[in-house]
Amino acid sequence: MPFAKLPDAQIFYEWAGPEHAPVLVFSNSLGTTHRMWGPQVVTFTKHFRLLRYDTRGHGQSSITPGPYTIEQLSWDVVRLLDCLQMDRIYFCGLSMGGMTGMFLGANAPNRFHKIVLCNTAAKIGTLESWNARIDAVQKSGMRAVAGAVLERWLTPSYRAAHPTETAGVLRMLEEANPEGYIANCAAVRDMDQRNALQNVKVPTLILGGTHDSSTPAADGQFVAEHIPGARWVEVNAAHLSNLEARDEFNSHVINFLVK
């Protein structure tokens, strides 16, 4: 299995697509793995070589002691690129992955051609809500929160029409490592980038979901308004727009990246 050995962790990654195509990194959301980007592989490999990885504390990457920070998770991406001898690439992250993208756009702009920030915000949730979630997982494990998270991630109509895919998302959440999940919850809880958005110096697309209660469209619009030159698009989906509105998602992101 391919792992990048960082100073204090191993990051699992996976390649897909033509070897000499431009590289696009996909960054997963809290509680998922690189597999969340499955709906994008066939379409995006027509244009890019995809680099999907498991964020620290997720999937097959190391579960190092927490709490983590978005800064830490972001420099993991840069070190991953260094290990793979990648100079400048394209980046797409959703939710926590989007927060990672914001930090990278402001602090390592020379490593990225363009950045896509999906279903995310400069600040997500409240101290109280994150501490309550952390407490629930500490006491009762991932099953204590997975059902409620799933209800925010996918609309009722999508869940009803796609039971197999919905079950797959729930399974990914329930199988998340509790220690890694808690450490990443702390990273999202403690990050507030509202005053740093003007420092993003990379062409940026912000994509939000009309029915997203986790990171409402208004939060995405705020990000778009404060990153110089950023574009905003909205799709008919809840939080996992790359799954629920995959065709619309794929079209918007590819059109932005290839032009």
Image (cartoon, rainbow, N blue to C red):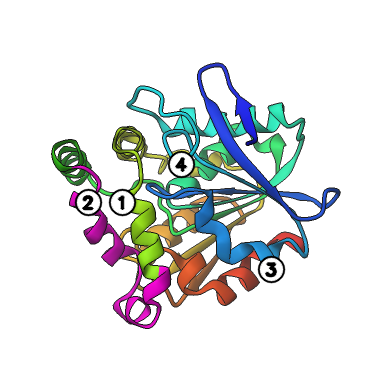
Closer to the camera in the image, 96 or 226: 96
State the separation of the CA atoms marked 1 and 4. 12 Å
State the separation of the CA atoms marked 4 and 3. 24 Å
For marks 4 and 2, the one nearer the N-term is: 4
Q: Is residue 83 above or below residue 238?
A: above
Relative to residue 223, is residue 79 drawn left or right? right
Tell me which amino acid carries mark 3.
Answer: Thr
User: Which residue lies at the image location 63% right of the left edge and 36% below the top edge?
Assistant: 1
Q: In the structure shown, which secondary structural element does the residue marked by tag 4 occupy?
A: loop
Circles 2, 1 touching at the beta carbon (< 8 Å): yes
Q: Is residue 166 above or below residue 104?
A: below
- Mark 4 vs mark 3, foreground winner is 4
For marks 2 and 3, the one nearer the N-term is: 3
Which residue position is annotated with label 3? Answer: 43
Tell me which amino acid carries mark 1.
Answer: Glu
Magenta part of the chain: 141-165
User: Which residue lies at the image location 57% right of the left edge and 61% below the top edge?
Assistant: 38
State the separation of the CA atoms marked 2 and 3. 33 Å
Which residue position is annotated with label 4? Answer: 59
For marks 2 and 1, the one nearer the N-term is: 2
Q: How many marks?
A: 4
For marks 4 and 3, the one nearer the N-term is: 3
